[in-house]
Amino acid sequence: MKEQPPERKTSEEGRFQDDYYSYLELPENATRYIPVGFFLDEAFKEQSFSLLDLGCGNGALSKYLPDRCDYLGVDHSEGAIEKCLNLYPNRNFVCQDLSVLLPELVAQQKKFDAAVLSGLLFHSTDKESLEKKDDQEIIQFCLDKLLSDKGYLVLIVPFAYGDHPSHNFFVRAEWLQKSVEKMLETAKAKIVYENISLQIGLDKKIRQQQAIPDWFVPDSATDYSNKYAGTYMASWTFIASP
Ligand SMILES: C[S@@+](CC[C@H](N)C(=O)[O-])C[C@H]1O[C@@H](n2cnc3c(N)ncnc32)[C@H](O)[C@@H]1O
């Protein structure tokens, strides 16, 4: 008899409820956000600028942006947005799915000086249909419809490495770099900044903090080398202009 695939609960909601995403707040994870903070601070020297953080999670990026940044974070997780509003009462957050909010922003003719996709590419899966969202489509949408003329698209791509061959640092880093560069080239965007940053010690913190959450069901098609495969340890930051 053919084995049934495991039922997967892909909603992010559980992750915020059981504090899985609290690692985003740890000082060890700061290197994920610092490069973009520096870049935008310099690019918009002494000027205010607007920024849309797509899938903002618990809003950790907002800590690394200057006060003159007019920040709007959006996430479909109510738990995440509740955290954001408590942690950063001076910033703006909205709880909505991107598929609903983005067309609304376009209809209102809203433009942003920066649009950030941090931890959104490569693992965004529709929680109902389990279909992969189209990364190329969202990149194109941001560039064509959401960014101002002087705007920047920021892609932060966290990735893991470990004992398993597919987690080899350099292989993963090179593969990610090529994939993102290709998507930006297809979208006719010009890369103006690239950076790779390590998150030293973050894996140990997560191992201390985490038991396998209840909602996690291993995928029978995946060869998990150990239960912590997937721990974020580094990020690529790509910044492009339309
Ligand atoms: C890995 S977390 C990254 C959080 C944050 N960007 C960061 O890097 O600190 C991905 C986030 O994207 C949100 N997300 C995924 N798909 C979304 C969608 N279609 N609409 C709104 N939020 C979404 C999830 O709820 C989750 O908070």
Image: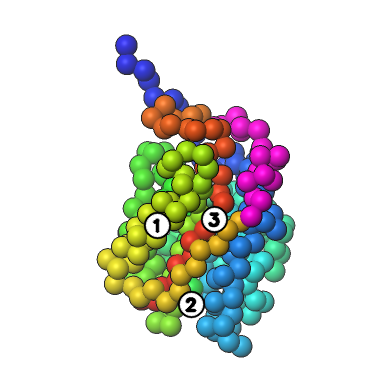
Q: Is residue 212 above or below residue 145?
A: above
Q: Amino acid at mark 1?
A: Glu
Could you give the CA–CA distance between mark 2 and mark 1, rounded to whole angstroms? Answer: 29 Å
Label 2 with label 3: CB-CB less than 8 Å: no
Label 1 with label 3: CB-CB less than 8 Å: no
Instruction: Indicate whether residue 182 is drawn in magenta.
Output: no
Disc 2 marks which residue? 113
Q: Amino acid at mark 3?
A: Ala
Disc 1 marks which residue? 174
Task: For marks 2 and 1, give the one nearer the viewer.
Answer: 1
Q: Nearer the viewer, residue 164 or 107?
A: 164
Quadrant location of the N terminus in the rendered image: top left
How far from the left and from the top, in percent, is residue 222? 41, 32
SS type, badge 1: helix
Q: Nearer the viewer, residue 240 or 19?
A: 240
Residue at image location 54% in from the left, 77% down from the top: 39
Q: Callout 3: 10 Å neighbours few (<14), some, many (20+)?
A: many
Q: Amino acid at mark 2?
A: Asp
SS type, badge 3: strand
SS type, badge 2: strand
Residue at image location 64% in from the left, 55% down from the top: 200
Residue 102 is at least partly visible in this image: yes
Residue at image location 37% in from the left, 38% down from the top: 129
Image-quadrant location for residue 193: bottom left
Disc 3 marks which residue? 234
Task: For marks 1 and 3, give the one nearer the viewer.
Answer: 1
How far from the left and from the top, in percent, is residue 144? 34, 71
Q: Is residue 25 above or below residue 215?
A: below
Q: Which mark is residue 80?
A: none
Quadrant location of the C terminus in the rendered image: bottom left
